Image (spheres, grey):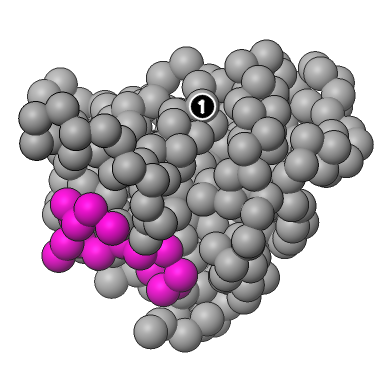
Amino acid sequence: MKTGKQLDKIANQIRQDIINMLLAAGSGHSAGPLGMADVFTALYMGGVAKLDPKKKNDPSRDRVVLSNAHICPVLYATLAHAGFIPHKQLKTLRKLGSPLQGHSNSHFGNGIETCGGPLGQGLSQAIGMALASRINFKTKRNTKYEIRNSNYHTWCLMSDGEFDEGQTWEAVMLAGKYNLREVTAIIDRNNIQIDGFTEDVMPLEDFAAKLKANNWFIIEIDGHNIREILDAMKKAKAMAANPTAIICHTIPGKGVDFMENKFEWHGKPPNKEEAKIALHELRTLNGKIISEHQ
C-alpha cells in the first residue's frame, strides 16, 4: 500500500506527463486533467478501488467510466503509472494510429470500461453497469436471470459542466429511485467549462442539495487532498443503500500558476515555452519533486 506522500509524488509526476503529452500532441485539454491528477491517483493506486493490471479482465474488478472523456490525458498518464499501459506510449496521444485517442476509449482493453465522447452520457452508462452487477446472466440454454450480490463497484468520473445536460439528471433520478449503492459519481467541481465559469453559463448551486433531493448521499472534499479523497471513496463503497456523489472541489490547471482557475485553458495545450515554464513549476514543487520519466 502506497503512503500519502508517495501518492502525492505520483500525482505530481502525472501532471508533468500531462504537460509533455499535450506538448507532443499539439492539441488537447490542459485545465481539467491537471486538476484531477490527485483524484485519479487515489482511484487507481490508493487501494480502495479493485483495479489490478495483472487481472484486467477479472469479472469482479471495479468498473470505471470516464464521462468527461476530454480529460483523458490524466487517465492515460495514470494508467501508465499504475502499470496498465507502457509509459512510452503516452507521447502518442492524438497521433494517427495511436490507441490513445483525444477522447478516452476502451479499445486497448485496459483500466477503463467505455469509450467517451459526447458529454452527459457517462453516468447513464455507469448506472447500467451497476444495475447489471445485480444480475447473474446465465448462458446455458434459456435459463432465467438470477439476482446475485455482486462484488464490484462502479465509479463514474464526471465534470460539473455536464450537469447542464438533461440526460445527466435523468440518470441521477434513476439511481436514486433504485437506491443504487453500487455506483459512485466522482464529480470534478472546478467551476469552469469551455465557455466560461459554470455559474455564469448555467448556475448549478445549490449543487449538493439538488443531488441530495434525488436520494444521493453527498460527500464534499478538497480534490487535492489524497487522504480526503481516499476516505470519501471508502465511505462510498461502504454505503448500504444510496448512490454516492463525491463532489471534488478542484483547481483547474492545478500546479501551473498561469493556468490555474482560467477557463481559457479548458481546451488549450501549452506551446513549447509555456510547457517549459509549467514543467519547471511542477519539478520544483514541494522540494524539487522530479519525475523519474523526465
Vertical relation: 176 (above or below) 134: above
- For residue 267: magenta? no
Identify residue for label 1: 124
**Is residue 119 at all visible to an observer of this figure?**
yes
Give the extent of the magenta segment.
44-60
- For residue 52: magenta? yes
Q: Answer left or right for 56 relative to 182.
A: left
Vertical relation: 292 (above or below) 53: below
Q: In which quarter of the image is residue 253?
A: top right
Q: Label 1's element? A: helix
Q: Which residue is drawn at 19% across and 34% down?
A: 143
Q: Where is residue 66 in the image (x, y as percent from the top left)?
A: 44, 37
Q: Answer left or right for 247 relative to 16.
A: right
Vertical relation: 210 (above or below) 56: above
**Is residue 74 at all visible to an observer of this figure?**
no
Q: Answer left or right for 28 relative to 24.
A: right
Q: Which residue is drawn at 58% across and 44% down?
A: 180
Q: Which of 234 and 135 is in front in this view?
A: 135
Q: Nearer the viewer, residue 254 or 248?
A: 248
Report the number of numbered marks.
Answer: 1
Q: Residue at x 51, y 50 (%)?
A: 182
Q: Residue at x 63, y 28 (%)?
A: 174
Q: Nearer the viewer, residue 110 or 196?
A: 110
Q: Position of residue 6 (x, y in %)?
A: 44, 80
Q: What residue type is labelled 1?
A: Ser
**Could you tell me which quadrant the N terminus lies in?**
bottom left
Q: Answer left or right for 24 relative to 155.
A: left
Q: Nearer the viewer, residue 149 or 259?
A: 149
**Could you tell me which quadrant the C terminus lies in?**
bottom left
